[in-house]
């Protein structure tokens, strides 16, 4: 049922696919590196989780999405947004809290999204977006849309009650969804062995009579092949499945964590040897699909792209403070509904002259 | 039009909205074959089938979350939580998600979802099944909370809730399901949010209440009028948005106020109302606002203890009399 | 791993054990029948869930408990209380809401308990007592007590997030606990097939690398043998396990439900043929362990016992209303702590002269 | 004695209680090897080992429940919820179980458990990580809720909480962890529950606050005193039990009150306080009680928006000035 985590990709990709995948991984890598730097320059606030090292798991799966499919992810979502095609400038602008950001500066690093591209968010409560993603699959099913949902989350989310309830609902209701565990082997400083009674996470699928499998999450082709196959099953046979992609984060949990207390230098090093981007590059050169020069060229391009994104984001404006109360409610009638709330408490008094109210 | 029960009013509203809009669907435990633990969805599963009336496992966190996801894609789920006591396992989905998504998404996604949940006590259901938690939700930006007290309002407000673009917690009350009343002749006569209603006019004291307590207040008013005291009863109907103006107008007239609720009043609905009445009617009040709520204990099973814990008419009336006596009206 | 649900008991019990088991099942059956009658006479209020038909699952497992072991159960707990040895009069008194009840009238039908006998409650929120039971196992472990915990719950609880989080914690922490699914095949009107993506519930154990097994829950000896074996593993090897006992409730979900809308007469009938008490009686007579006369005698005894329990409970006093605020807090200092809460809201005003406060 | 941070005060209290009582143990995510997401448990795992400092998976519902079960058998778990935002997935265990067990069990079992959870906003953590939900718990019979505002109180009240026989929600604040102050010389000088404290004396206005907002209030008081106005600041310290008397005594002296809090004040802590102040000081108030709280929106990420949403000193001061101006003091 599961593949050995080390199996080499059998499929040799066409040059175009190869370029697309490699370039996106490179773009994410460079974007994350510069993001880290921007954070240290205090242009980014709050929590900031980098996905350096996990590019293959993100890109391989998202590349298998088709028009109309839906995507949900965790707060480690910068690469996710880039992978769906959100403009790097709009992603960086969100990290900077600018009005031109993908969430107009309301969401920040953990809550990126791109509704036109069907990316329904980076979410901050571990495990909680699984039921929501399951509900979006229910909506596709309700409307007989031939699409599927890809829901990505970390290994730590597997131990939450939400994981259990979501997968059981998807199983008993035959929902078109693929749950992808991006297993980077730690939830903050806690290893999978410490937190999971069954550390082979893909095996959890059996509890829901669901197909489960594990692939090498640092092998972009293996991830893509598996995601594509499982998404097809979801679209065509309306069956859910669980895909575990085993990978590693080179950085700490967030920029505030060095990531060294709970991981040995040897362990970190052994994974650096399996850097998904280097690996894929070497593979492509070996098979003569892309030249080393082309790859260098690619890195130069993405570096410029990220630099331009930063410049554009820096130039963008912050949201207008007067819009603070916009979008709390979406119903056009809400102001009317709240009109009689009157004085006596902050809410509903914004039109009055009370200086301590924004 | 003949009187119908509160339960039937809800059932009709659901039926008519399911009929009207194919995007409306119901989700919850036992709402299909079993016709609802309290029979509110009677007949709907037979009429609309399993797709429109979806039975769920015991997974509140899961199916409330599923409702949110479905709403984000444009459907209009009406989720039934069998009783509000079980909503505690789904709090994160409602407070951290349903309430915040529209804002977090910078306005690019809406969550047009209704969560129906009955609360209340009085049938010896004991501590884990006798709570009134609506005040918590009423304090959450992004949520709307309504608590109709009559069949007509239940009917009109449930339709408003289903057609609203925002997540709405629709608070019911177990004891109220069998209460009867008239329904409006016009099925499109929806009841708006944010408008409290003076359900009994009076001059001597204003009793502010919501949900089932409104009916207790009306009985107290009747009893007091026999002593020549006229109590005005204001039915809040909606807790967020809250109509403070109608309450204030009433108190400016009566100069006295009592807030009654079934839940615990410390940090409860009564606290917010008392604070606002004092703020808005500072110069009008003859006497501080009194509050009557359920005794602040986990609800005991034994009947005499439960009766002692409930905010019955006798307690509300005693509080009203004490205010009126202090003010020399009685 | 699982036993066929129909396997006959190999073990032939000694006469004393046989009598004890049969008598307890008979006592529960009679107690529940009279409880139903008492409810219709409005002496019992609230929800009232009968376990008629499930006696073997309850008694077989509880009979395997040893001194110092802990027991947790759901709200369907009348038989549970009787099985741990709580006096029938104290159990009936609780259903009547009397001060002499096992919870002094504070708990009622759903919340029976007997702390001296280590029965830590019937619980009302489906699934929620699993984490709590797991915590009691943690306490046994913390204090190196050679005991174990038995946690009973229904099939419906398996789909709650609490089930997942509790079993994973027990698995990853090696807790001495046996989780018993009393699978009566319905959660209210919902069948296991409708609610569970993996209706063979015992298989859920594998998701936690835990031993799981299914036994015929209407075969008191099979239940007892399995519970005894798994409790030993918990006590001696400090390993948790999941035991599914397949049974059926002859009545509705609660006294308010006829139980017929969602179950066919044939289905109900086929299970009545496998009545756990009749079956065990026949088995004992066939093997010459107990005579038919003795069994009749037993029924007469338990009937009298229940009748006396009812009479005693009827005669008992209701709790004194002045004790309403007792036991909200257990710290001796609580009154002092709340003293300055003062007037302005109901709480803390009980000493004042405000007639609407109890 | 040298000043220590709020974080260090908590760490010491935990250390000393672990040392004192073998039944005390800690449970939570990342509190061991990782030394706590906010480093409150630094060094304790190394010192006491994995049994006394138990690291958990991401299963709040599971391990809060496990804490309850352990407490029922006599242990004294101190459970850390990384931030109060995550407590929403464990609400059922706290509200339907921890709070009710002693009562439901007719007094035969106790739940001596502490749940530590920091709340608050200001570090751009956005909507799902910036909440103040303490008011909800303060309304639940069976729970005790405390919210110390200084290192000394954090130290003294955490010890009181651990030795208390009832479940206690110990509310902290992320922004406060680095605030410094003195600790009492006597490690046994515990701080009792239910006693608010006048942390600054004044004659013109009473500002009532809890947790981090107390420190904002003190800065506002300093600023106003430059204009010759003396503000009295009352630190509630504990929300349930609530010390209404100390608050009332202060307002009877100043005749004016402002309640400030970091959370949403509609249906919040401010509502209960405003209601009580009006009730207890009906004839003493020159002006209705004002409330300042966080803007009632899901907290936005962008810095300018977040600043606009926070109840900063500037807003509290503006509210204070407006009261004082209305009353002719300024
Ligand atoms: C319910 C909940 N509990 C705790 C947290 C705090 N927290 C944030 S990320 C994290 C670790 C999650 O690990 P994993 O799921 O493996 O994702 P990764 O960070 O490795 O990508 C924790 C515990 C949270 N956000 N939500
Ligand atoms: C969290 C929660 N949701 C819903 C309910 C309402 N409810 C009470 S019993 C029940 C069915 C439980 O079925 P099962 O676990 O199989 O136990 P059984 O009644 O069959 O013994 C439900 C849904 C509840 N008590 N708790
Ligand atoms: Mg991880
Ligand atoms: Mg069942």
Image (cartoon, coloured by chain):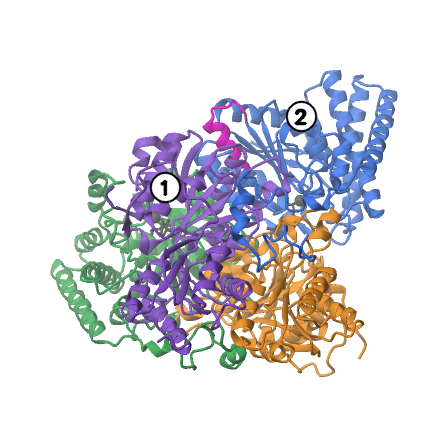
Chain colours: A green, B orange, C blue, D purple
Q: Where does label 1 land, which residue?
A: A192
| Magenta-drawn stretch contains C142 | yes
Chain of residue at mark 1? A
Left or right? Give the position of C174 relative to C38. left
Left or right? Give the position of A38 relative to B271. left
The residue range painted magenta reads C133-147
Residues at marks 2 and 1 touching, judged by CB atoms closer than 8 Å:
no
Residue at point 73%, 62% (across, down): B313
Left or right? Give the position of C249 relative to D197. right
Measuring from the top left, give residue B169's x and y in whole percent.
Answer: 57, 66
Secondary structure beneath label 1: helix
Picture quadrant where residue A149 is located: bottom left
Classify 10 Å Cα crowding around label 2: few (below 14), some (14-19), many (20 and above): many
Picture quadrant where residue A74 is located: bottom left
Q: Nearer the viewer, residue A16 or B285?
A: B285
Above or below, A330 against D255 in this view is below
Secondary structure beneath label 2: loop
Residue at point 79%, 35% (across, down): C31
> Residue C63: which disc?
2
User: Which image quadrant: the C terminus of chain B?
Assistant: bottom right
* Mark 1 Cβ inside 8 Å of ligand 3: yes
| Magenta-drawn stretch contains B97 | no
> Residue C353: which disc?
none
Measuring from the top left, give residue C336's x and y in whole percent.
Answer: 53, 44
Instruction: Give the number of the mark in front: 2 or 1.
Output: 2
Report, in whole angstroms, how far the alpha carbon at label 2 lies from the one at label 1.
38 Å
Classify 10 Å Cα crowding around label 1: few (below 14), some (14-19), many (20 and above): many
Q: Nearer the viewer, residue B208 or A112?
A: B208
């Amino acid at each position: 049922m599961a593949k050995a985590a080390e199996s080499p990709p059998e499929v040799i990709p066409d040059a175009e696919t190869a370029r697309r995948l490699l370039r996106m991984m490179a773009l994410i890598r460079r974007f994350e590196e510069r993001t880290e730097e921007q954070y240290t320059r205090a242009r980014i606030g709050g929590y900031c989780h980098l996905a350096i090292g996990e590019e293959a798991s993100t890109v391989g799966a998202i590349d298998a999405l088709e028009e109309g499919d839906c995507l949900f992810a965790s707060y480690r979502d910068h690469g996710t947004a880039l992978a769906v095609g959100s403009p790097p400038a709009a992603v960086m602008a969100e990290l900077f809290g600018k009005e031109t950001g993908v969430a107009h500066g309301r969401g920040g690093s953990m809550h990126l999204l791109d509704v036109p591209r069907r990316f329904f968010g980076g979410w901050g409560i571990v495990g909680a977006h699984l039921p929501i993603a399951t509900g979006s699959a229910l909506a596709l099913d309700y409307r007989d849309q031939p699409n599927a949902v890809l829901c990505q989350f970390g290994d730590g989310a597997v131990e939450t009650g939400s994981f259990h309830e979501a997968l059981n609902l998807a199983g008993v209701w035959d929902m078109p969804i693929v749950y992808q565990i991006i297993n980077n082997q730690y939830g903050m400083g806690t290893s999978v062995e410490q937190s999971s009674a069954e550390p082979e996470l893909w095996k959890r699928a059996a509890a829901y009579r669901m197909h489960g499998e594990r692939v090498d999450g640092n092998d972009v082709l293996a991830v893509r092949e598996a995601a594509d196959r499982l998404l097809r099953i979801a679209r065509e046979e309306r069956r859910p499945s669980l895909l575990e992609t085993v990978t590693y984060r080179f950085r700490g949990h967030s920029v505030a964590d060095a990531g060294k207390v709970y991981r040995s230098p040897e362990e970190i090093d052994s994974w650096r040897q399996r850097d998904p981007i280097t690996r894929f590059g070497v593979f492509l050169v070996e098979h003569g699909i892309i030249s080393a020069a082309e790859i260098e060229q690619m890195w130069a391009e993405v570096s410029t792209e990220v630099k331009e994104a930063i410049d554009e984001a820096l130039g963008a404006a912050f949201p207008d403070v007067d819009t603070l109360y916009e979008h709390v409610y979406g119903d056009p009638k809400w102001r009317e509904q709240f009109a009689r709330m009157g004085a006596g408490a902050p809410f509903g008094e914004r039109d009055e002259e009370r200086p301590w109210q924004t | 039009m003949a009187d119908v029960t509160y339960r039937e009013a809800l059932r009709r509203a659901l039926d008519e909205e399911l009929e009207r809009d194919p995007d409306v669907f119901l989700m919850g435990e036992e709402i299909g074959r079993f016709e609802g633990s309290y029979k509110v969805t009677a007949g709907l599963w037979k009429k609309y089938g399993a797709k429109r009336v979806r039975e769920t496992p015991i997974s509140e966190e899961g199916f409330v979350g599923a409702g949110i996801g479905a709403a984000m894609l444009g459907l209009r789920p009406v989720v039934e939580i069998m009783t509000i006591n079980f909503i505690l396992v789904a709090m994160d989905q409602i407070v951290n998600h349903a309430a915040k998504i529209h804002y977090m998404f910078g306005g690019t996604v809406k969550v047009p979802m209704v969560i129906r949940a009955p609360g209340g006590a009085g049938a010896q259901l004991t501590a884990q099944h006798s709570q009134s938690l609506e005040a918590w939700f009423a304090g959450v930006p992004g949520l709307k909370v309504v608590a109709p007290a009559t069949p007509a309002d239940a009917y009109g407000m449930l339709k408003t809730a289903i057609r609203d673009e925002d997540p709405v917690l629709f608070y019911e009350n177990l004891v109220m399901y069998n209460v009867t009343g008239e329904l409006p002749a016009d099925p499109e006569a929806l009841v708006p949010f944010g408008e409290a209603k003076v359900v009994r006019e009076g001059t001597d004291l204003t009793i502010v209440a919501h949900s089932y307590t409104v009916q207790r207040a009306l009985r107290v008013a009747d009893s007091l009028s026999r002593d020549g005291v006229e109590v005005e009863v204001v039915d809040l109907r909606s807790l967020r948005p809250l109509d403070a103006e109608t309450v204030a107008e009433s108190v400016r007239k009566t100069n006295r106020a009592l807030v009654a609720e079934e839940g615990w009043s410390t940090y409860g609905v009564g606290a917010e109302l008392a604070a606002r009445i004092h703020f808005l009617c500072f110069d009008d009040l003859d006497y501080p606002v009194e509050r009557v709520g359920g005794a602040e204990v986990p609800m005991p099973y034994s009947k005499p203890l439960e009766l002692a814990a409930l905010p019955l008419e006798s307690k509300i009336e005693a509080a009203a009399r004490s205010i009126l006596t202090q003010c020399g009206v009685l």
